[in-house]
Image: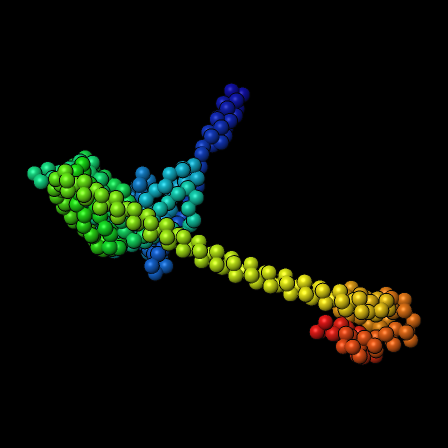
Amino acid sequence: MIFEKNKLLFLVILVLLFSSVNFVSAKEFSIVSSISGEELNGFVRIDSLGDYYVAEGEKLVLPDLSGLNTTYDLLLKSQHLDTFDYKSTLTHNSDSELVARPIGLLRLSVKDELDNLIIGADVSVNCPTEVYLLKTNSVGMLRAFLPTENCSISVFSKNRVSSFNANIQQGLITEKTVVLKSIPQNNYLLYSLIILFVIIIAFYLAFRKKEDVLNKKEEVIDKEEKKIDELEEDLKQEEFLAEKMREALKEKELLIIDSLIARSGKASLSEIRSATHIPRTSLLRTIDSLEQRNLLIKKSENKKVWVELAKNN
């Protein structure tokens, strides 16, 4: 009896343990090139999530990310190159297909005139498709994966500044050491004014470009509104002519026209007679009159007389 009770208690504990386990579902991702659209494979590194390897023909398998609200950088090394050559982003609601763009690595050292590394120097990276505002780390260096483009880079620290261009190559490391030289106070003020002027010009050109786009949109809208006005005018003219035509029609003629309109412009003689209650002889005579004025067309089909509105009315 005691054994049976212990067995039952053991089963209850097992059920409670299994019900409390949180099974984590996995999700598969394919990584494709933004250039060729082909699937990529190789060594993958994801911030805070670890390292993975995606073999050819396989997919990247990750744990369920639905409870995470962070955006992760995904780096892929697909070739035998110096460093990672593709980059993508990953969020909790990313599609199963991750698009990765080609990248290269910029490794930058920033020093002063005495060859001392500068900590916390501001680094502005302007690429055609991306803009980054970065800082040198605690040893005066910067590592940044950038798109494979010709990027303009400016480095600032107090009254010291330097600029250069870097042509980033896919999967390669671009090494650069920048020496920031102090600018005399007068020159520094002039340089600051020049930078401010360049910024203002850039904002002005961006505003003009936006304004040009808005003007083009307004031109398109004006053309569409003009077309609508013309269509409305044509419609009013047609309604006016239709009204004048109705005024010129007799009562029986109007009844026949309205019965045809109600039947999408075509009806048999018997249907018109049933709808208008006009005697057959009078109906035929009225239809002939309308046909002579090119308002109706009368024809025989399958031993029945059909009447339809003329297409030009």
Where on the picture, by quarter, is residue 294?
bottom right
Instruction: Answer yes or no: is residue 7 visible.
Output: no
Question: Please, is residue 62 above or below residue 219 in the view?
Answer: above
Residue pictured at 14% horizontal, 40% vertical = 186
For the view shown, which residue lies furthest in the top direction? 2
For the view shown, which residue lies furthest in the left direction? 114
Where is the C terminus found, in terms of image quarters?
Answer: bottom right
294 or 25: nearer the eye?
A: 294
Q: How is the image coloured?
A: rainbow
- Percent x, y for residue 252? 86, 69
25 or 129: nearer the eye?
A: 129
Where is the N terminus found, in terms of image quarters?
Answer: top right
Report whether 171 appears left or right of 294. left
Instruction: Answer yes or no: is residue 56 visible.
Output: yes
Report whether 180 appears left or right of 212. left
Residue pictured at 12% horizontal, 39% vertical = 184
Report whether 203 appears left or right of 143. right
Question: Please, is residue 131 above or below residue 278 in the view?
Answer: above
Residue pictured at 37% horizontal, 38% vertical = 70
Where on the picture, by quarter, is residue 299?
bottom right
- Percent x, y for residue 150? 24, 55
170 or 40: nearer the eye?
A: 170
Residue pictured at 70% horizontal, 74% vertical = 312
Where on the picture, by quarter, is residue 244?
bottom right
- Percent x, y for residue 117? 13, 38
- Percent x, y for residue 187? 15, 42
Count how many numbered circles sit on residues in the image.
Answer: 0
